[in-house]
Image (cartoon, coloured by chain):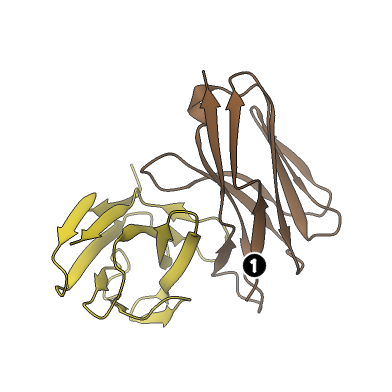
Chain colours: A brown, B yellow
């Protein structure tokens, strides 16, 4: 099946630093979704991307839909302690159905105050 | 407020016992999903249901069972056939035609 590869697997940064993470696939995706999971909670949708080349922001978060449609990037500017969590990329599985999402394994972000 | 509720938050069971995890949503969403999360493994799909009285196996359905008798409810039973049931279980739902899921807050199951 389709796989999404996220990198890095984990990051340890100081408060105030900017963060970049990415998600790649061997197959084309028509939509990219970015979720954040706080410790012990369910993931929450941060940003949805629907068009190749699209750049979308949500506060300090900016995500881009890669031109090749095989990758996506998430940037967090001026990190704060509450940015701690696991960030997942996701996209609809192939086969014409929009009912199932494929998730990456996540990037674990730790922010040192 | 609309949302998706999983209960209980923490669950302990003895090995060999079946256990049922609850998932209820009042969002009027058509589709519901169960995912399993293990450290470093991401989210793996167990079962999903697009409409009432219909459901399909996901990628790791062995040892699990579900039912969808009502639109609002999608309980997951972890049977004794599941060889490694200790994990964090997430339920999700979505509106037909949209892509983003709404997740519950999860149930952490520990089998001893």
Residue A62's quadrant in the figure? top right
Residue B88's quadrant in the figure? bottom left
Q: Position of residue A113 (x, y in %)?
A: 51, 17
Q: Position of residue B70 (x, y in %)?
A: 27, 71
Viewer-proximal residue among B36 and A46: B36
Q: Position of residue B2 (x, y in %)?
A: 35, 47
Give the total number of marks visible in the rendering.
1
Vertical order, B105 against B81 (above or below): above
Q: Residue at (50%, 32%) from the top-left corner?
A: A84
Residue that mark 1 sits on: A3
Q: Residue at (38%, 82%) from the top-left corner?
A: B54
Viewer-proximal residue among A12 and B19: A12
Vertical order, A35 against B48 (above or below): above
Vertical order, B96 against A13 (above or below): below
Q: Residue at (46%, 47%) from the top-left corner?
A: A43
Q: Image quadrant for the N terminus of chain B?
A: top left
Q: Could you say whether the residue bearing mark 1 is in a helix, strand or loop?
A: loop
Q: Is residue B8 visible?
A: no
Q: Is residue B64 visible?
A: yes
Vertical order, B91 against A11 (above or below): below
Q: Callout 1: 10 Å neighbours few (<14), some, many (20+)?
A: some
Residue A5 as seen in the image, left or right of residue A86: right
Q: Residue at (28%, 54%) from the top-left corner?
A: B107
Q: Image quadrant for the C terminus of chain B?
A: bottom left
Viewer-proximal residue among B5 and B72: B5
Residue B40 as seen in the image, left or right of residue B77: right
Q: Chain of mark 1?
A: A
């Amino acid at each position: 099946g389709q796989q999404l590869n996220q990198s890095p697997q984990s990051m340890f940064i100081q408060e105030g630093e900017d963060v970049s993470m990415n998600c790649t696939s061997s197959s084309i995706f028509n939509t990219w979704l970015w979720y954040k999971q706080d410790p012990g909670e369910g993931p929450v949708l941060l940003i949805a991307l629907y068009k190749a080349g699209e750049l979308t922001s949500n506060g300090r978060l900016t995500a881009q839909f890669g031109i090749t449609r095989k990758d996506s990037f998430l940037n967090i500017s001026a990190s704060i302690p509450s940015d701690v969590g696991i960030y997942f990329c996701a996209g609809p599985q192939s086969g014409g159905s929009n009912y199932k999402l494929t998730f990456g394994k996540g990037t674990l972000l730790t922010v040192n105050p | 407020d609309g949302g998706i509720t999983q209960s209980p938050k923490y669950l302990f069971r003895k090995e060999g016992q079946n256990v049922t995890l609850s998932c209820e949503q009042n969002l009027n969403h058509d589709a519901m999903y169960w995912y399993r999360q293990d450290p470093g493994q991401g989210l793996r799909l167990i079962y999903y249901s697009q409409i009432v009285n219909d459901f399909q196996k996901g990628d790791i359905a062995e040892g699990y069972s579900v039912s969808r008798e009502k639109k609002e409810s999608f309980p997951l039973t972890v049977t004794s056939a599941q060889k490694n049931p200790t994990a964090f279980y997430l339920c999700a739902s979505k509106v037909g035609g949209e892509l983003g899921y709404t997740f519950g807050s999860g149930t952490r199951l520990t089998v001893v």
